Amino acid sequence: QDLEQRLGAAAVKDLPLDSIYMDCMAFGMGAGCLQMTFQAQDVCSARFLYDQLAIIAPYMLALTAASPIWKGILADTDVRWDVISASVDDRPPAERGLAALGEGQKTIPKSRYSSIDCFISTSCLNQDKFNDVECVVDAEAKQKLLDDGIDDRLATHIAHLFIRDPLVVFHEKLEQDNATNNDHFEN
């Protein structure tokens, strides 16, 4: 009934009945979780830690599976990650590969809240063959980073962040001194 009010009866009649409709970001981001922040002694250690956490994260996710019910209905998942990923997936149909790409558009394989797209450590344990998934990058941003002395792995990681528009931008933070404030990068 709530969907009918929001979408209209005509739109709702075509929706499958055996689905759970969560139509706002709060269904994903509002789900309970434990978040931990780590501090490393230097950038090299932080990059190694980033890569290692990406390897063990799926195991931790499986061990903490505790979200089998959404909106009172038993779902075919028991973790909240897919729900979070979908709730903030702001890619238009073309970027999802569901429609023709417009000028300057690229297909982006996954939501911004997804698994990592590349390993970034310069450790000898991190071999180039491990970076075997497509990592879409902003070519101009990557070249600028490389020209400024950033190594290829970190340049790829950061240039990948620039393929998307900011998710949240506050009006009062539009104009700021980027030399003293990093909100433009963080958002």
Image (spheres, rainbow, N blue to C red):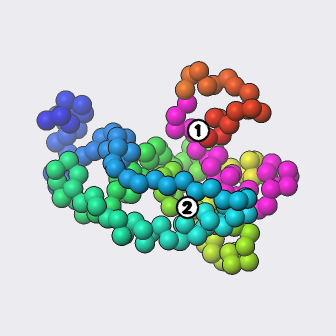
Is residue 137 visible to the viewer in this orientation of the structure?
Answer: no
Picture quadrant where residue 186 is located:
top right
Q: Secondary structure at mark 1?
A: loop
Mark 2 residue crowding within 10 angstroms, few (<14) / some (14–19) / many (20+): some
Helix, strand or loop under label 2:
loop
Position of 33 with respect to 74 (left or right) is right
Residue ID at (27%, 58%): 67
The magenta segment is 144-169
Of 106 and 20, the residue lying toward us: 20
Please state the horizontal and vertical placement of residue 94, each as a whole percent of the image.
49, 48
- Residue 13 occupies which quadrant of the picture? top left
Comparing 125 with 83, the one in front is: 125
Residue 160 position, x and y percent, is 64, 53
Picture residue at 33% right of the left edge, 48% below the top: 31
Tell me the crowding category of disc 1: few under 14, some 14 to 19, or many 20 or more residues within 10 angstroms, Cα based.
few
Q: Quadrant of the C terminus?
A: top right
Say if the magenta span includes residue 56: no
Q: Is residue 60 above or below residue 6?
A: below
For residue 24, above or below residue 110: above
Q: Is residue 93 above or below residue 41?
A: above
User: Amino acid type of disc 1?
Assistant: Asn
Left or right placement of residue 23 versus residue 127 in this view: left
In-front residue for pair 26/14: 26
Q: Is residue 150 magenta?
A: yes
Whole-angstrom CA distance, mark 1 to mark 2, is 18 Å
Indicate the position of residue 172 as horizontal and vertical percent values: 59, 21
Question: On the image, numbered disc 1 is attached to which residue?
Answer: 187
Q: Which residue is mark 2?
A: 116
Image location (x, y in percent) of residue 146: 82, 55
Q: Residue at x 72, y 73 (%)?
A: 123
Q: Tag 2 or tag 1, which sits nearer the N-term? A: 2
Q: Name the residue located 65 percent from the left edge and 40 percent from the top edge.
A: 185
